[in-house]
Amino acid sequence: MRKQGTLTQAEMQVMNILWSRPGMKGTIADILEGYGDKKPAYTTVATFMKILLNKGFVGFEKMKGTKTQCYYPLLSKEDYTRQVLDGVKDDLFGGSFSSLVRFFVKEERISERELRDMLDIVERQDTVE
């Protein structure tokens, strides 16, 4: 898969709305509904969609009999998360996952309980393989 780069906060908000929609598809009007009470202008979302198209994060199909475009993500939230975290690990921690975890432990951004939970996951994964 081609590395697309990262999303801005505003682009991430649009992608989260798309990822949460039934079938992960939606028109600009559908995406606007996902904003709740603080909706940006229709043209703002249209601009975001154009940017996301150019960056390779979304595709679209025309709805039958209309000019309306229905957008859909070209990668899953999990794939995007993996891509971003791999980039952070490689760019900031020399590719070392243990250095990344040490950083979070040192900065007290991960609790002992969370570390135990992570070890449990690793141990369960080892027994499956």
Image (cartoon, grey):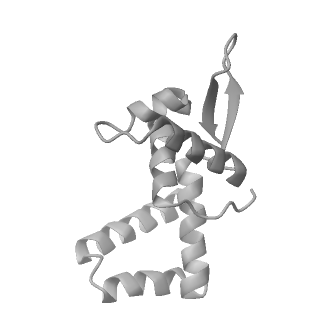
Q: Is residue 119 left or right of residue 128?
A: left
Please say whether residue 4 is visible from this viewpoint.
yes
- Seen at 66% across and 18% down, the residue is 63
Q: Is residue 19 left or right of residue 70?
A: left
Please say whether residue 21 is visible from this viewpoint.
no
Q: Nearer the viewer, residue 47 or 124?
A: 47
Q: Give the position of the N terminus as an image quadrant.
A: bottom right
The x and y percentages for residue 38 are 31, 42
Total numbered badges shown on the rendered structure:
0
Residue 36 sits above or below residue 23 on the image: below
The x and y percentages for residue 99 are 48, 87
Q: Is residue 12 left or right of residue 47?
A: left
The x and y percentages for residue 34 are 39, 35
Q: Is residue 71 left or right of residue 118?
A: right
Residue 78 sits above or below residue 45 on the image: below
Q: Give the position of the C terminus as an image quadrant.
A: bottom right
Q: Nearer the viewer, residue 77 or 10?
A: 10
Extreme top residue here? 65
- Seen at 71% across and 62% down, the residue is 3
Residue 107 falls in which quadrant of the image? bottom left
- Seen at 59% across and 71% down, the residue is 86
Residue 76 sits above or below residue 3 on the image: above
- Seen at 53% across and 59% down, the residue is 81
Residue 122 falls in which quadrant of the image? bottom left
